[in-house]
Image: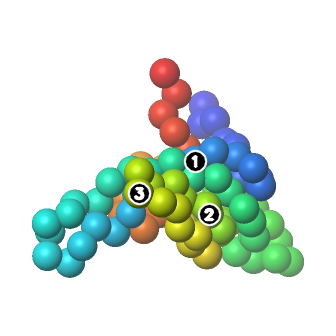
Amino acid sequence: MRFVLIPTIGRIVHYTNLGDKDGKYPPETQAAIITGCLPRNPSNPGPHEEDYIVDLHIFYRTGDFFMLDVPYSSVPERGFWNWPPRV
């Protein structure tokens, strides 16, 4: 059985940043808070994470950043958000 959480404002998630194009700084997972959430299809919002895009407040060691319209991935993938692993 697949456990599904609909993204909502205030939830803590992970965001995998893009890294740099030269590969000197590879993509890394960062902590983020959902600050906005919109269904991809407003007339028919779906029951799964991938049916939504979110706005994030991302926290880095050196500061923070805001990212709009971030899609979901079930595994860490650069430019996407995902739920923190359950331990």
Which mark is drawn over residue 62? 3
> Is residue 60 toward the left or the right of residue 37 in the image?
left
Quarter holding the N terminus is: top right
Q: Position of residue 33 (x, y in %)?
A: 64, 53
Q: From this viewpoint, is residue 17 visible?
A: yes
The three-letter code of the residue at mark 3 reads Thr
Nearest the eye: 27 or 60: 60
Q: Name the residue under label 2.
A: 56
The three-letter code of the residue at mark 2 reads Leu
- Tags 2 and 3 in contact by the CB under 8 Å rule? no
Which mark is drawn over residue 13? 1
* Mark nearer the viewer, 1 or 3: 3
Give the CA distance from mark 1 to mark 3: 19 Å
Q: Is mark 3 on a helix, strand or loop?
A: loop
Q: Residue at 75% of width from left, 50% of height from top?
A: 10
Nearest the eye: 78 or 57: 57
